[in-house]
Image (cartoon, grey):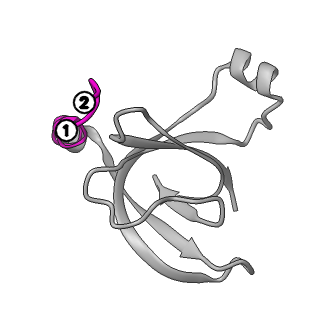
Amino acid sequence: MGLLDGDIRSIIGEALQSIMLDGTYYVTDGAGTETANHPVRGFVDDYTDHERGMLALPAEDRRITMLADGLAFTPNLNGRVTMEGTKYAVLDVVRDPAGATWTMRGRPV
């Protein structure tokens, strides 16, 4: 049994729930048509100048972090997410080792 096995996902989800913002994740088909949407909790953050330079990220790309606890889907590159009134195309998706959050690179659409 690993250190991150068990209920850590739920513990982190409960601890962060009150400080996260409401958002919507849109599942899309290959053509970009939205086929379903799901309520999510998360926040949007800027990349540092160092990250932008090292990864060659455009200025409009933002980091979006969503709680994984309670999600009935896995975010993917065909998705879109609305957070703080802006809709973003998902360009990259990474799950943290505990499975508590999903971090995505988003670009406004």
Q: Which residue is mark 2?
A: 1
At x 36%, y 41%, the residue is: 99
Instruction: Please tell me how crowded label 1 is: few (under 14), some (14-19), or many (20+) other residues with Cα within 10 Å.
Output: few
Quadrant that contains the C terminus:
bottom right
Residue 16 location (% of width, % of height): 23, 37
Image coordinates for residue 54, horizontal then vertical, percent: 79, 20
Real-space Cα separation, disc 2 to disc 1, in angstroms: 9 Å
Report how many numbered discs are placed on residues in the image: 2
The residue lying at 63 percent from left, 28 percent from top is 47
> Callout 2: helix, strand or loop?
loop
Left or right of 87 in this view: 37: left
- The circle on residue 6 is 1
Q: Residue 34, which numbered label?
A: none
Q: Which residues are magenta?
A: 1-15
Report the side of 74 relative to 3 (left or right).
right
Q: Nearer the viewer, residue 109 or 6?
A: 6
Which residue type carries mark 2? Met
